[in-house]
Amino acid sequence: MSHRDKFLNRIRTNLADALLPAAEPQHPGSFQAYSFNTNQSIEALVERFEQELTALSGQVYRVEEAEGIAEIVLSILEKHDARQIMSWGSAALEPYRLSEALQAGGIEVVERYIPAEREGHAAQLAALDNVRVGLTGANGALADTGAIALISGPDRGRLASLLPPVHIAILSRQTIYPSLPAFLAEQTKITAMGSNLVFIAGPSRTGDIEMTLTMGVHGPGEVHVIITP
């Protein structure tokens, strides 16, 4: 028997005796509770999404009027003593009427364009490195995992959700789906809408270094989701 065969045989033997930890039956993420049902009420989906994202150290805010969005964004900026913000373009965020509120609050929306030339590229990245807060919309969300969907493209740059240590996302409650299969079944053309589709479930975290959980190593250490009507 070759070394490869011995190695694979050990795996087969150990897998047969392995015991995987079972989720608590009452936990919404357990297999028993997993559902493809799309007939759930919007309020139930919002509740589930908030529960899951909060469990992942994300922060959720609900607003009833568009004016409440600017108030929350400005309060997060104030908490971090931030006078700059990197955001999706105005066309993507115009429905929320944030430009005027940010300007009135003395907040500078920084240029997120990165030049291709080496000298300009490095200089602009260095400048953006000081921006602490990023602001984006969201193209949908998954209630069962607390994940938001972001599609990159014109006016929807990836840097705003990746580079700053604090990420604020604005999500319509009308676009929260029970699960990934339900999301993809409804949004049949979503993968062709942009160059990149990602699902973000809470702050970035890693346990690679001595198995110690660390937040914000590979992306934002804080994720705030504002749920709109």
Image (cartoon, helix red, strand yellow):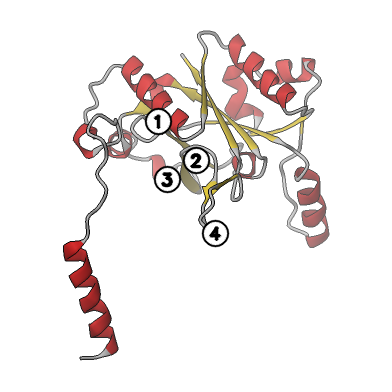
Residue bearing mark 3 = 192
- Rendered image: mark on residue 191: none
Q: Secondary structure at mark 1?
A: helix
User: What whole-number distance in Å separates the C-alpha atoms at marks 4 and 3?
Assistant: 40 Å
Q: Is residue 35 visible?
A: no
Query: Considering only order in the chain, which callout, 1 or 2, is on the residue closer to the N terminus?
Result: 1
Question: In the displayed structure, does residue 137 sit left or right of residue 172?
Answer: right
Query: Considering only order in the chain, which callout, 3 or 2, is on the residue closer to the N terminus?
Result: 2
User: What whole-number distance in Å separates the C-alpha atoms at marks 4 and 1?
Assistant: 27 Å
**Which marked residue is nearer to the observer: mark 3 or mark 1?**
1
Q: Are marks 4 and 3 in contact (CB under 8 Å)?
A: no
Residue 215 higher or lower than 55, as above or below: below
Question: In the displayed structure, does residue 198 sit left or right of residue 86?
Answer: left
Residue bearing mark 2 = 151
Residue count near mark 4 (Cα–Cα under 10 Å), binned few <14, some 14–19, many ≥20: few
**Which marked residue is nearer to the observer: mark 2 or mark 3?**
2
Residue bearing mark 1 = 52
Residue bearing mark 4 = 210
Is residue 119 or residue 135 the one in the foreground?
A: 135
Residue at the bottom extreme of this rendering:
1
Q: Are marks 4 and 1 in contact (CB under 8 Å)?
A: no
Q: Are marks 2 and 3 in contact (CB under 8 Å)?
A: no
Q: Secondary structure at mark 4?
A: loop
Q: Are marks 2 and 1 in contact (CB under 8 Å)?
A: no
User: What whole-number distance in Å separates the C-alpha atoms at marks 2 and 1?
Assistant: 21 Å
Residue count near mark 2 (Cα–Cα under 10 Å), binned few <14, some 14–19, many ≥20: many
Query: Considering only order in the chain, which callout, 3 or 4, is on the residue closer to the N terminus?
Result: 3
